[in-house]
Every structure is written in C-alpha cells, then in structure tokens.
Amino acid sequence: MTSTDLTTPNARGTDAPGTFLRGTDADAATRTGLAAVVYNPIKVDLPALQAAVATEESAAGWPETLWFETSEDDPGQGAARQAIEAGASVIIVAGGDGTVRAVAEVVHGTDRALVLLPSGTGNLLARNLKLTLGDPGASVRSAFTGIDRSIDVGMIDIRRAGGTVDRHAYLVMAGLGLDAKMLANTDSELKAKVGWLAYAKALVAVGRDRNDLHFRYSLDKQPAQSMRAHTVMIGNCGLLPAEIVLLPDAAVDDGHFDIVVLKPTGVLGWVQILAKVIWENGVLSRTPLGRRLKTKDVDALNYATGTELVLRLHRPEEIELDGDEFGSAVAFKTWISPGGLTVRVPAPAAPPA
C-alpha cells in the first residue's frame, strides 16, 4: 500500500505552513469585528451565556453577536457555515469536543478565529491549550480582547467498506482499537449522567475483546509495512482527561502529529504501558530530574512522528475522532495541516506597573 491509495488532500491552502502566533500586541483590545456563537443547547446555560456575551460585546464596542444552535442532524458544520456567510470574524464555540471539532472542520483554512467556551466532559483541546476551565466569563472575554494563535489541524479521509471516502478534521486524536471500541460500547445516557465514569463500563466489555488490529501502513511515503497491534492513536495533542499524558512530545503547533501504537503481550505488556503512560509521562516528565530517570521505550508501547499516514486494515474496524465514534473504516489517510486553524486565546496579563 502506498500513500496514493486514498484520495489526496484538496488544494484549499490549508496544508501550507502557517504562523503560530498573531496579534500579540496590545492592539487586540481595540480591534472590532462581528462575533457569532455556535452553541450546543444541551451543554450550555443559554441565558447566562447570552448575558456574558452582551456584557463583553458592549464593553468592546462590537455589534450585536449572532447566535446559531446545533442539533442532532447538524453538530456544528452547518451552523459554522451560516456564521461565516453572515460575516462573523470570530466564532465562539460553546459545546463539547464534538461541537468544537465540527465547527473547526469548517473554520480551518479561513481567516476566521475560533474561541473555545469549554463545556461537556472532556474539553480536550482546551486542556491541551491550557485554557481556564469553569470560567465562562473569561472565555467569552477572550473573544473580544484576546490574541490569535495558529494551531495544527489533523485531516483524515476515511474509506468505508462500500468504497466511499469521507473527509473530516480532528484537533486532538484519531484512533483505532481500544479507544474507538470503548466509545462504540459507551452508553450515551450514562455518559450524560456521570461523564467520563461511563467509559469504565465500556472498558470492561472491550477488555474482553482479544482481536488485534492487522494492517499495512505507510508513514510519510515510506515503503508500506505490515503490523499487528492492539491500538493505534494519531495525536495532534497529547493530554487526555485526568491529566493522563499519552503522547508526551506532542504539541498542537509543531507541524506534525505523534503516533502511539500499543502492542501488549499479556499482563506484563499492560503493566509496561501503564508504567510509561501514568508514571513516566504523567509524573517523571514534569521535572528535569524526572526526565533523566525515564527508561527506554518498551516493546508494548511504540512512538513515531510524521505528517502523513496511510493505513489499510485487514477487516473493518471502529474509528474515533476527538472522542466521538465515526463508524467502521477499512482504510484511512491522515495528514497534518500546519497552522491551519486560528484560535483566539486570552491575552497575557499586563506586567505590574
């Protein structure tokens, strides 16, 4: 299998390197534009959000903000298109990771800025950008007074069993194996009640699945190779909920993605994986001394980096993007769009006088 087995990226200008930081001076506070809010009505307190937006738009001297609601049939793409067509220069996303991913799928490659209003259970992109959670007022304020930061976007063409190919964006991770099967087995009603604890039940069920992934892959147009593995994850970011660092070297603006392959053999293999991910990545890597104590890579856990990966599976397998299940895939091609999305973040605090 070569990298031309799937459709190639379209030429929309989203694959060219971008500038990672823009507008870092104090002029941000005097900038005017038109804001739009794309919100998931299940995830937000709409009256409180409307009041916060009204306060900040008035303080900044901006016109009245536009509002677009998502739905089960339109998780955010259609609402984002409407916002852009209406002339919005800043799009505030109020929802979970799925809403953020859907809106970014439309906004990336444009000159519009995305603002995250963390909601829901994961907030993975917000966590990886080290944004403040639980302070919607500050998040809204950054839409009108913040600075712009360019981040990478993962793009993926997923081939289905019937031969069709559909294209999507992801901001955090795409995965096959444990995480995708776990999501497919998660009770959505239970997740709404208890959040991430709902995955524990699904994890038990998936743990009984002894079927490995069997695939051929080509990384960065290198000759194709065969592999068996338990799980494959391609990450634009490395931090998971509960401060679990799955990909310690991943950065959202480094121009490439990081890949982790889990290949445990029995209980010892899982012990090696947990030791690397929980102890070394999550604890030792946080200090200079701890980083010197880290061990070498283990057979059960392999890392790689790249900008393009083509993978063809022996049989259809579940795939996930940013924590949402995306059905079954027989193959996919994923590539990185460097600096493809502009995210507006809070401006640095002014130094004391």
Image (spheres, helix red, strand yellow):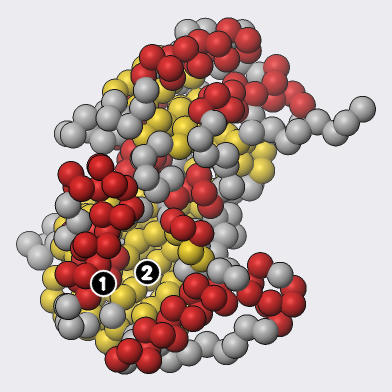
Rendering coords of residue 161 (x, y %): 10, 65
**Spatial separation of the CA atoms under disc 2 and disc 1:** 8 Å
Measured along the vertical axis of the image, is residue 58 above or below residue 13? above
Residue at 37% of width from left, 23% of height from top?
A: 45
Quarter residue 299 falls in? bottom left
Q: Which residue is mark 1?
A: 177
228 relative position to 124: left or right: left
For residue 23, the mark is: none
Q: Is residue 352 left or right of residue 297?
A: right
**Tag 1: amino acid:** Gly
* Relative depth, front residue between 305 and 245: 245
Residue 322 versus residue 81 in the image, above or below = below
Q: Quadrant of the C terminus?
A: top right
Above or below for 158 versus 146? below
Quarter the N terminus occupies: bottom left
27 to the left or right of 63: right
For disc 2, the marked residue is 233
- Kindly state the secondary structure of the residue where label 2 is placed: strand
The residue sitting at 50% across, 79% down in the picture is 276
Element carrying mark 1:
loop
Q: How packed is label 2: few (under 14 Cα within 10 Å), some, or many (20 or more)? A: many
Mark 2 or mark 1, earlier in chain: 1
Image location of residue 115, percent across then percent down: 50, 32
Q: Position of residue 182 (x, y in %)?
A: 23, 64
* Residue 158 appears in view: no
Mark 2 touching mark 1, by CB under 8 A? yes
Q: Residue at x 40, y 36 (%)?
A: 119
Mark 2: amino acid = Met
**Who's the residue at 51% across and 16% down the image?**
52
Of all residues, the one furthest to the right in this rendering is 353
Depth check, front residue: 80 or 54: 54
